[in-house]
Amino acid sequence: MGNSRVNFRGQRADMSPLESVEMQESSSPMRRGVIPVAVLAALLLAVPWLRTRLSARWGGPCVPVPLPVRSELEPLTARSADRLEGLATFCDPGVRGLINRVLFYGNDATLASAGPARNVMLWSLATGRADVLEGTIEYHSLAISPDGEILVGGGDDGTIQGWGLTRRERLFSVPHAHRAPIWGIAFDPVGGAFVSAARDGMLRRWSRASGALLGEVGGVDEAWPVAFSHDGQLIAVGNGESASLWTGKTLEPRGSLTGQETATWAVAFSRDDRRLAAGSDGPAIRVYDTGTQGLVQALHGYRTTVRDVQYNAAGDLLAAGGWDGSVTVWDAAHGKRLASRDGHQGRVQTIAFDRRGLLLASAGDGGIIRFWGVRRRPVVARSPTSGAR
């Protein structure tokens, strides 16, 4: 054996096949436990990363926190917005997923949310509990009529469904209303109709009572968000690389807005309808003059997509939600950032102001809804002698 030759693996030339296999197994790193230790170490190092990724995907833990009473809050304005703070969290531990839209209605007593789990959830602001409108589609868009009586939702399969909010019963369903997911739906504020826009390039007008088609126009490109002006005269539509304006009743084109170089995910008219805010992949918010269609402001400071933009009822604030988890409030007149909060562990998909001007809601990953506002400062009583010298 001392004269046996050894090959490059360290095996004897006269070694039997069985001896060769046994030698390889005994000398392998797996046999010695080197690889299992290394794999275990790598997994341990990856746990925090995995936890962070999963937490972001699901929006973090669901820990409901009730809203304070309205008397404890002061109006959210350009003067008070720098004191913006998280007030409450609504969520259902059994229903997790992405919320695509939130809307206040019913004198701000209820918040409607689109999704998750193919449902529309109606949250009581007083109790933090939700009633469920059981749908058959995943709702990408949601709108409530100006009188608060009808809710319509646009689905991922191109279906539109309408609900009566008084009895909470389904009024109509329009299968294949579009040949693509419906990302935009909005009510005419002064008429008995609503419009929808989808990635099939169609803009359609529907009866709010029956869901009957009233009119349509093509060539809108891959349409995503849609919004009505407050006077009902204009419709704004965001698409792949721009935003466009259309007449509210006849759906005639009024022109495209310049300066949008990436996908437009959100559009919102100012209270006086003179300006239109657009959120995009920029990442930035661009504000346009609806008369000249020229760029007025470009609001920067975002790390990724600006997914939603909304003006408050008074018109002095512009809020935005981003996929970086941020909620930002701007002075609408001067383009000054007043507050920026990172209250979400995942994406912010939608935001909404209440009509009273007290609350801002935001939602996205994980089925989690956050509420923001400004608490009243405590009144410090002065003693009778505090001013004496």
Image: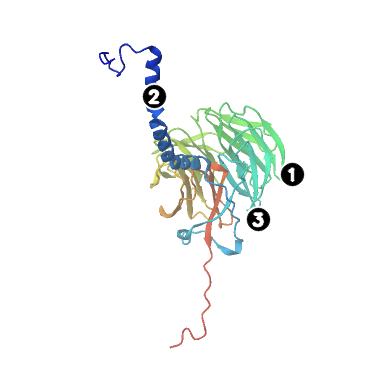
Q: Secondary structure at mark 1?
A: loop
Label 1 amino acid? Arg
Mark drawn on residue 289: none
Taking the spot 52% from the left edge, 85% from the top edge, the residue there is 384
Q: CA distance from mark 3 to mark 2?
A: 68 Å
Label 1 sits on residue: 167
Q: Position of residue 196 (x, y in %)?
A: 58, 35
Residue 54 relative to residue 356: left or right = left
Label 3 sits on residue: 126
- Compare residues 47 and 60 and report the one nearer the observer: 47
| Quadrant where the C terminus is found in the figure | bottom left
Mark 1 nearby-residue class (10 Å; few <14, some 14–19, many ≥20): few
Q: Nearer the viewer, mark 3 or mark 2?
A: 2
Q: Position of residue 336 (x, y in %)?
A: 40, 54
Residue lying farthest to the bottom in this orientation: 389
Q: Nearer the viewer, mark 1 or mark 3?
A: 3
Residue lying farthest to the right in this orientation: 167
- Compare residues 15 and 127 and report the one nearer the observer: 15
In primary-sequence order, the first of circles 2 and 1 is 2
Mark 2 nearby-residue class (10 Å; few <14, some 14–19, many ≥20): few
Q: CA distance from mark 1 to mark 3?
A: 20 Å
Q: Secondary structure at mark 2?
A: helix
Q: Is residue 290 visible?
A: no
Label 3 amino acid? Ala
Q: CA distance from mark 2 to mark 1?
A: 74 Å
The reply to whether dot 3 and dot 2 touch (C-beta < 8 Å) is: no
Residue 180 relative to residue 8: left or right = right
Q: Secondary structure at mark 3?
A: loop
Label 2 sits on residue: 26
**Residue 18 falls in which quadrant of the image?**
top left
Label 2 amino acid? Ser
